[in-house]
């Protein structure tokens, strides 16, 4: 017969195993190794290609129109990813898609 402490530990282990089996979202770090087509290396064996990557507008070259004092001015923001940029990604449950959250800097 199990003691209460052993039963609690067994339940905790079962819960942890269930969460691990679902592969919830997780953060991973990578490095941009190609721009066109976009490729990000997350370790020596895994290279993510553009089909697996979701890139937010803020990490691209994009235009924005700003209105100030009744006058509109268009600005172009040159913020596209570059080779050797280090990035943090959010891996979708199941690992089929990766959202690039932002660049990271070496500390």
Image: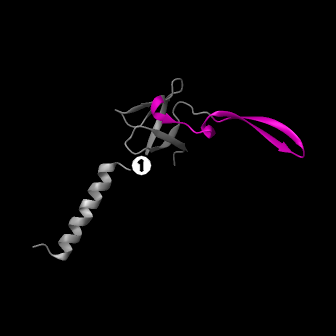
At which x and y percent is residue 83?
Answer: 53, 30
Q: Outermost residue toward the bottom?
A: 4
Quadrant of residue 18 within the rendered picture: bottom left
Q: Which residue is mark 1?
A: 25
Residue 96 lies left or right of residue 21; in this view the side is right
| Element under disc 1 | loop
Image coordinates for residue 5, horizontal then vertical, percent: 20, 74
Q: Specify whether 8 is left or right of 83.
A: left
Q: Main secondary structure of the magenta part?
A: strand
Q: Which residues are magenta?
A: 51-79
- Vertical relation: 107 (above or below) 77: below
Q: Image check: 102 left or right of 24? A: right
Q: Is residue 69 magenta?
A: yes
61 with respect to 5 (left or right): right
Q: In which image quadrant can residue 19 be found?
A: bottom left
Q: Residue at x 51, y 45 (%)?
A: 106
Q: Residue furthest top?
A: 36
Q: Using a 10 Å C-alpha cutoff, classify the residue at mark 1 as few (fewer than 14 neighbours), some (14 to 19) or many (20 or more).
A: few
Give x and y (percent) for residue 42. Answer: 41, 37
Q: Nearer the viewer, residue 30 or 12?
A: 12
Position above or below: 78 against 88: above
Identify the residue at horizontal 44%, vertical 38% (top origin): 97
> From this viewpoint, which residue is outermost toward the left?
1
- The residue under the point 20% across, 65% down is 10
What residue is at 26 percent from the left and 65 percent from the top? 12
**Residue 70 lies in the magenta stretch:** yes
């Amino acid at each position: 017969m199990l003691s209460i402490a052993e039963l609690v530990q067994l339940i905790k282990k079962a819960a942890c195993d269930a969460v691990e089996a679902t592969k919830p979202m997780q953060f991973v770090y990578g490095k941009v190794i190609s721009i066109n087509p976009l490729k990000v290396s997350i370790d020596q064996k895994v290279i993510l290609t553009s089909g697996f990557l979701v890139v937010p507008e803020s990490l691209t070259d994009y235009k924005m129109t700003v209105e100030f004092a009744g006058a509109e001015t268009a600005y172009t923001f040159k913020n596209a990813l570059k080779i050797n940029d280090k990035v943090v990604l959010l891996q979708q449950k199941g690992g089929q898609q990766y959202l690039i959250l932002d660049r990271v800097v070496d500390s």
